[in-house]
Image: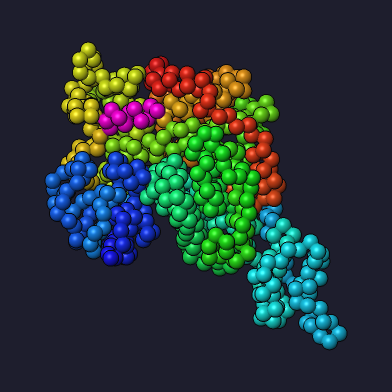
Amino acid sequence: MSYTVNFISHGKAVEVTDGTILDAAAKAGIAVEGNCGGKGSCGKCKVQIKEGQKGTVEKHDEKFFNEKDLREGWVLSCKYKVENDLVVEVPHQADAFSRKTKLNSLLENIQISSLVEKVYLELPKPSIADQCADYERVLRALNLEQEKQKPANALLRMIPKTLREGRFKVTAVLNDGQLVWLEPGDTTAEKYGAVFDIGTTTVVCLLINLFDGQIAAAAAETNPQNVFGADVISRINYIIETKGAGLATLQEKVAGCLNGLLQKTLEETGVDKNRVYECTVVGNTTMSQLFAGVDPTYLAPSPFIPGYVSAQTMTGAEVGFDVNPQCQIYLLPNIAGYVGSDTVGVILGTHIHERPQYSVAIDVGTNGEIVLSGNGRILACSTAAGPAFEGAQIKHGMRAADGAIEEVFIDNEKGTVDISIIGKKRAKGICGSGILDAVAQMYESGIIDYRGSFNIGENKPEADIHPELRKRIRHTESGYELVLCPQEQSANGEDIVICQKDVRELQLGKGAIYAGIQVLMLEMGIKIEDVKEIMVAGAFGSYIRISSALLIGLFPHLPNGEILSIGNAASEGARLALVSREERTLCGDLARKTEYVELSARMDFQDEFIMALNLPAKN
């Protein structure tokens, strides 16, 4: 028997025969947080049933909802089984996606030399004296050798009609010397491509003018695969649990998302979809393989073997993109199982290999990819930083969106807590930069000690904490927590807090990244005094306070250098590979040259990690 789930918040309805509301949302293409992969432990997939709710209350609901919430129909979508028709509302979250599209451009130093060329032709019409075939007629005008061409059937089918529509005045489209398309009339002034950065949490699309490399439009969206888990392991497990059937679902989700973002940029600019001739794609190794439809199952267990690391090429038609049928999709090469093409993008986007001094680049996310370059070598590693920096596995964590606390200021002398909220609205939760800020401020004000434990209770110096701040600290069944925003000031009528577990999650993440940096320096044979810069990539790196990152020990202090925020370097690298044939060749060379350092089997990483869990001395 089938049931209808009507998502009135999105104007979509789907028919389902079994499964949960979260499954129905996935089928409808509606983004609902699924950080724990449907285990009911994160509490992020809250939805409100407007009509059709059963009268029973599950234990997991009692954990995340009060009596009023339950009466109003709030449930966890991952645990609520669809057994009758339902009308459901999914809370709207206006993500701050503009943060994901900020680039630190190197274009001024790069010569634009796109592989895509357009040539206007005025061809002689066929006659009894000139019976040259249509395809060969075009090749003859372009001085191309037929033996070196590999025409697709789509090209051959459209040439006769196109030539006559244009009265033999046409524009030929070539990609790396191969004739790929033909257009009636003179369209040489229009030449576009697209860049995609497939993040585990967020997907970014940039529409690029291939003549000058500039961004014509940008769009971003939550990765729709998130309903199957917040991290790559959860998504791999989904494929395993479905005996491989889930691979097609995950591939369709991300490909559909990319196509949707590209259509948004085309609508915004008025660019004809058939004028998009090439795309470059970056992502971690799992995301890249899922987009290509390659089973990533063997990435999860040791020895973490990917299906491929080389660059891959396919057409837009093969992945379901609604653009020029012969649009070439170029996936940048990966480096290893957990260092993907997004890291290659960071290397290319910073040209870290050309810097005269020892430099570090870090892309902080669910996985923290770290690159150390100098003395003719490039080293890279990946640390399991955990999802705390993305706001996941945090009690009131959320992505960087309207209502997210992004900065925290604690004054122990005055006893005040001030917060800065994205969108200048009431607080709904706290994002990664806010979590980092809060822990740093709690440490500096004495609310937590160097071990990350609350400085309150037996044998704790309570007198060092201002009485007004002490009022904000309370003890619960799961330990102490600090109220950042009281319920009367929040958007959802509940206190927004940082609890002891949140602090621990951040310690694990920051400890892994710090330890990864230390191991790469040991491998390179240098000390921290030799490092001249740490470049922090990604949206998280652009919006954190560096002082807070140093205070908690996310990054080491550089006695002879500086720490820089560099924006979305992965997308910048993909843009360079799109607009410059030299940069594309270089990205392949850099991927092969980069030495991958596997941390999981190294005792020195374990030692460094344990030491890095503590918060460093404040001075």
Q: Main secondary structure of the magenta part?
A: helix
- The residue lying toward the viewer, choosing from 522 and 20, is 20
Rendering quarter of residue 446: top left
Q: Quadrant of residue 173?
A: bottom right
Q: Position of residue 110 (x, y in %)?
A: 67, 46
Residue 536 visible? The answer is no
Image location (x, y in percent) of residue 371: 57, 32
Compared with 518, 409 (above or below) is: below
State the quadrant of the C terminus: top left
Q: Residue at x 78, y 77 (%)?
A: 133
Answer left or right for 384 relative to 405.
right
Residue 63 sits inside the magenta stretch: no
Residue in front for this viewpoint, 300 or 241? 241
Residue 521 lies, in percent from the top left, at 57, 22
Q: Is residue 391 left or right of residue 280?
A: left
Q: Residue furthest front?
A: 243
The quarter of the image holding the N terminus is bottom left
| Outermost right residue | 129
* For residue 115, side relative to residue 557 (left or right): right
Q: Which residues are magenta?
A: 498-508
